[in-house]
Image (tube, rainbow, N blue to C red):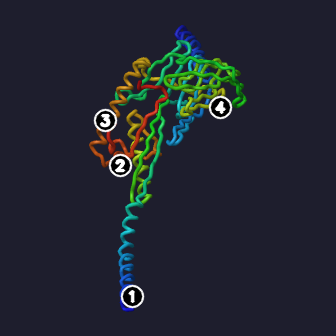
């Protein structure tokens, strides 16, 4: 009877220990898996019937951040391509000013 | 003195009609054809724009939007293509910054494509249209031209059919143009083109070199700063040309 009691106690203690150590471990794994990945697409039409298509895939710990990074990346690439034709991109693109931007 | 006054009156009478002629020529009605341009290349978003064909006698201008009115009431726009039907030449804008700016134009033949007219008909926006097909610089196109509008013109470089092109798309559905309105309007436009630097073959050769130089420069920039926001993996920049300019 005493041996049986010791066995059950051992099982109970080990279960608690496993559970308490498992919980934070699972959380940390979840954190790395829960990185949000977002792709932003953009198209810009320029003279003589030509187009530039841009896609940017960005990952971040929050989806809002990933969305902002992907959209920024897309707009910067479109700005770069449009300026390389000597065009000034439309204000809706929110391109950095030429002085802040690499001269195409 | 009397002779001088007579001379002055004769001079005024002589020049007055000339001024009138110019003014009325400016107010003559012209044809404005509006097209909806759509570029549809999934997964990229569809790009839709309004473009206009302005036909003034033997010359037509293809412009983005419908022009901007100045304080003087004159409409101005950057001309993408100009077709000179009298001299059978087409001129198009071909900027390659910084060597060639937006006022740089190149010449092309008019019409630049050969059509096969098919025995198929369709009514589009109350216009009785006939089908025609062509292959033009890397793409196959299907067009519908209005039999009831005997104008051999159309959007972009497309032209040379017995009627106005009402609708045209390439076989992949990437480039599409569709007429949305046809009207006669007073000529309030002041349109023209910049310097012409060469013909299509010269443009194509220069463009290929310029484009490759641009891609190399962009690659070098990305390699120099792999952590920049618009760099790193997952960034794709793709150029789609309506004409095959890189062969």
Q: In this view, does B146 lie above or below B66?
A: above
Taking A6 as reference, is B129 left or right? right
Question: Which residue is the site of mark 1?
Answer: A4
Q: Residues within 10 Å of mark 1 (few under 14, many from 20)?
A: few
- Same subunit, labels 4 and 1: the answer reads no
C-alpha separation, residue under disc 3 versus residue under disc 4: 43 Å
Q: Residue B236, image x and y in percent?
A: 40, 41
Q: Closer to the observer: label 4 or label 2?
A: 2
C-alpha separation, residue under disc 4 versus residue under disc 2: 43 Å
Q: Mark 2 lies on which chain?
A: B
C-alpha separation, residue under disc 3 versus residue under disc 2: 17 Å
Q: Closer to the observer: label 4 or label 1?
A: 1
CB atoms of marks 1 and 2 within 8 Å: no
Question: Which residue is the site of mark 3?
Answer: B217
Question: Which residue is the site of mark 4?
Answer: B181
CB atoms of marks 3 and 2 within 8 Å: no
Q: Residue B221, image x and y in percent?
A: 30, 40
Question: Which residue is the site of mark 2?
Answer: B229
Please name whichever residue, B89 or B172, is drawn nearer the observer in this view of the structure: B172
Q: How crowded is mark 2: few (under 14 residues within 10 Å), some or many (20 or more)?
A: some
C-alpha separation, residue under disc 4 versus residue under disc 1: 92 Å
Taking B241 as reference, is B181 left or right? right
Residue A4 picture quarter: bottom left
Q: Can residue A54 be seen in this view?
A: yes
Q: Mark 4 lies on which chain?
A: B
Q: Closer to the observer: label 1 or label 2?
A: 1
Disc nearer the start of the sequence (3/4): 4
C-alpha separation, residue under disc 3 versus residue under disc 1: 77 Å
């Amino acid at each position: 009877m005493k041996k049986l009691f010791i066995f059950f106690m051992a099982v109970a203690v080990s279960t608690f220990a496993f559970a308490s150590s498992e919980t934070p471990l699972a959380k940390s794994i979840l954190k790395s898996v829960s990185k949000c990945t977002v792709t932003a697409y953009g198209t810009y039409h320029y003279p003589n019937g030509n187009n530039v298509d841009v896609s940017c895939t960005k990952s971040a710990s929050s989806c809002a951040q990933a969305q902002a990074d992907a959209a920024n990346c897309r707009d910067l690439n479109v700005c770069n391509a449009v300026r390389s034709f000597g065009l000034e991109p439309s204000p809706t693109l929110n391109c950095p000013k030429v002085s802040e931007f690499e001269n195409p | 003195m009397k002779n001088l006054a007579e001379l002055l009156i004769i001079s005024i009478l002589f020049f007055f009609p000339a001024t009138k002629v110019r003014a009325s020529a400016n107010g003559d009605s012209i044809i404005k054809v509006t097209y909806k341009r759509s570029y549809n290349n999934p997964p990229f978003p569809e790009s839709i724009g309004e473009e206009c064909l302005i036909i003034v006698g033997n010359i037509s201008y293809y412009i983005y939007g419908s022009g901007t009115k100045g304080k003087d009431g004159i409409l101005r726009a950057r001309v993408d293509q100009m077709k000179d039907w009298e001299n059978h030449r087409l001129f198009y804008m071909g900027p390659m910054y910084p060597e060639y700016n937006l006022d740089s134009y190149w010449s092309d033949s008019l019409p630049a494509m050969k059509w096969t007219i098919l025995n198929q008909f369709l009514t589009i926006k109350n216009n009785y249209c006939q089908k025609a097909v062509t292959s033009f610089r890397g793409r196959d196109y299907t067009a519908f031209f209005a039999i009831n509008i005997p104008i051999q013109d159309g959007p972009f470089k497309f032209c040379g059919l017995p009627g106005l092109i009402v609708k045209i798309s390439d076989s992949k559905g990437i480039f599409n143009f569709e007429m949305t309105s046809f009207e006669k309007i007073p000529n309030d436009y002041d349109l023209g083109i910049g310097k012409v630097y060469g013909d299509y073959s010269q443009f194509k050769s220069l463009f290929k070199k310029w484009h490759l130089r641009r891609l190399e420069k962009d690659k070098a920039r990305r390699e120099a700063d792999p952590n920049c926001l618009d760099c790193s993996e997952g960034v794709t920049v793709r150029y789609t040309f309506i004409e095959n300019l890189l062969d």
